[in-house]
Amino acid sequence: MGQVTAEFIGLISQPEIEKFLKDLTPSPTDLMLTKGLGLIQYHRWSDAETNLRKVIQDQPQSGTALLGLAKSLLAQNKAKDALDILKKFPSSREYNNAEVLRPLAEALIQTTPEPENPDLEAIYLRALNLIKAGKFPPALDGLLELIRQDKNFRKGQARKIVIAVLEILGEENDLTRQYRAELANILF
């Protein structure tokens, strides 16, 4: 069902009616933003990037567009570009979601092994390579196995990366619900 978005009472002039109707119609930038976010849901990362960059040209401080762009860049293994956006992210309601993505962007850029536990390190690096290739389910499987073996691996880095990948996939994705539940079972 629709919602009341605006209303008026009594007689109004022709210019007031035109302004009223104009205010109800989404702008081309708003439509482009909606399209870009929709493309993310369908994992059409490159198309989403193109649309969201157009939105950012018109609205450079749009937290929604910047977050969507960072997600699409990370999904395409453009971690440096994503990290640049995340480091300068504006204060907005999307700020916390952007902060969730930072550990993943940083990990994809700096994939140097730590010598403490070579077996777990191999799982971790393999998972990062799978993420770079856009193969999120096997990457998540590897990271969850790593967390099962060492919940504090790299000071919680594996857990943070799982959460970041789930953020990229989006709350409405069935994989997100499945892997979030599995992560909760492992941690608690």
Image: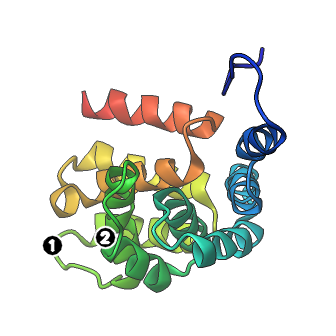
Disc 2 designates what residue? Answer: 121
Residue 36's quadrant in the figure? bottom right
Counting from the top left corner in percent of width and height, residue 142 is at: 46, 55
Q: Is residue 178 above or below residue 106?
A: above
Counting from the top left corner in percent of width and height, residue 138 is at: 58, 55
| Kind of element beneath mark 2 | helix
* Residue plotted at (42% across, 55% down): 164
Position of residue 7 in the picture relative to residue 66 (left or right): right
Residue 143 visible, this angle: no
Q: Compare marks 2 and 1 and give the one earlier in the sequence.
A: 1
Residue closer to the observer: 79 or 6 = 6
Instruction: Indicate the amino acid at tag 2.
Output: Glu
Disc 1 designates what residue? Answer: 116
Disc sitting over residue 60 in the figure: none
Residue closer to the observer: 74 or 180 = 74
Position of residue 184 in the picture relative to residue 48 (left or right): left
